[in-house]
Image (spheres, rainbow, N blue to C red):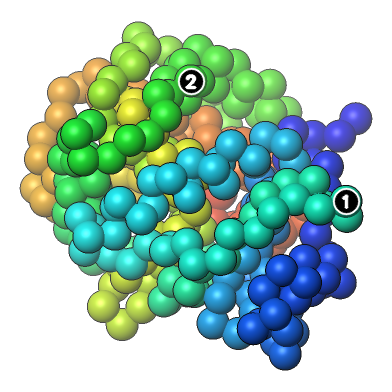
Amino acid sequence: MPHVWSAEHPVDASLAASLVHGQFPELAGLAPAMLGQGWDCDVWAFGEAAFRFPRRAMGVPLIATELEVLPRLAARLDVAIPRPAYVGRATEAFPFAFYGHPIVPGVPADQADQPDDARAALAPQLGRFLRSLHAISPDEVGAPEDDFKWDMARKAAKAIERLPMLDHPDLAAAAAILQDVPANRHGRTLIHGDVYVRHLMLGEGGLVGVIDWGDVRWGDAAIDLAAVYSFLTPASRPAFWAAYGEVDEETRRRARLTALANHGVSLLAYALDIDDARLAKESARSLAYAVG
């Protein structure tokens, strides 16, 4: 049985080239290079431009959201984000709209493979970035309302189903956290919606960019604050909260459960299924951080 992350319309190099060269002749001399493949999109580079192609129908509204929201965010944030520059249309060969943007600088944090002390040094930067994002008001940016990420019981149940797929020393501790489900809170904070290791771009200045904004929406800040528990070491959390600001205990519980369910258990199951050793290493690390 295919998994939720299985592609309905995978985009290989030939299809990517046909779509981009056919619709943007000024890029016709550039060959495609694979940048990344996620749950919802395949990403191909053409020179200095990155093109995002939905892999399945679920990714289509995410692309539409990015095209609507990203141009309004760039001036408000102190890290680089994608800036749409090419908007492609659906064709007979590929049924979804797609778009391209100048490549965001840096490398994804999973490729940097930093030791714990180097990752801990990023805590204040991550705190400042999320503080700035979460301070944006509805008058400044229009975005969708959260439709499902707030549902703590739903994400906990899905993660518990995936626990038997895993081999990790902290599974018992993970199960205990997942079974102690905090109350839901919808929230009215502008959130990125998927702050995790592959969406954080690192460079000489530390955190230099944040990518993949398809889940940006009005929702519960705890969804983004999950990064405190999935990306940062337990010892570095005070430095994050000092930069971001303190939150109540229930918000921390929702953030921890989200970190464990999404970026520990489910991401590890995904990484093992697609045989991605680097992502498996990072998601296993996130699981350990989240229970720590």
**Element on which disc 2 rests:** loop
What residue is rendered at 83% in x and 42% in y? Answer: 8
What residue is rendered at 36% in x and 78% in y? Answer: 203
In the rendered structure, the answer to whether residue 71 lies left or right of residue 178 reads left
Q: Is residue 115 above or below residue 137?
A: below
Q: Amino acid at mark 1?
A: Glu
Q: Is residue 29 above or below residue 87?
A: below
**Element on which disc 1 rests:** loop
Q: Quadrant of residue 157?
A: top right
**Circle 2: is it few (<14), some (14-19), or many (20+) Cα within 10 Å?**
few
Q: Is residue 282 above or below residue 160?
A: below
- Quadrant in the picture for the C terminus: top left
In this orientation, does residue 154 appear? yes
Q: Amino acid at mark 2?
A: Asp
Q: Quadrant of residue 291?
A: top left
Q: How far across and down, in percent of the image, does residue 128 sit?
A: 17, 54
Tag 2 near tag 1, CB within 8 Å: no
Residue position for label 2: 147
In this orientation, does residue 123 appear? no
Q: Nearer the viewer, residue 238 or 55?
A: 55
In the rendered structure, the answer to whether residue 3 lies left or right of residue 168 reads right
Q: How far across and down, in percent of the image, does residue 264 sit?
A: 53, 40
* Tag of residue 136: none
Q: Which marked residue is nearer to the observer: mark 2 or mark 1?
A: 1
Give the Cα separation between the discs numbered 2 and 1: 31 Å
What residue is rendered at 64% in x and 83% in y? Answer: 26
Q: Furthest-top residue in view?
A: 183
* Tag of residue 92: 1
What residue is rendered at 33% in x and 29% in y? Answer: 218
In the rendered structure, the answer to whether residue 90 lies left or right of residue 77 reads right
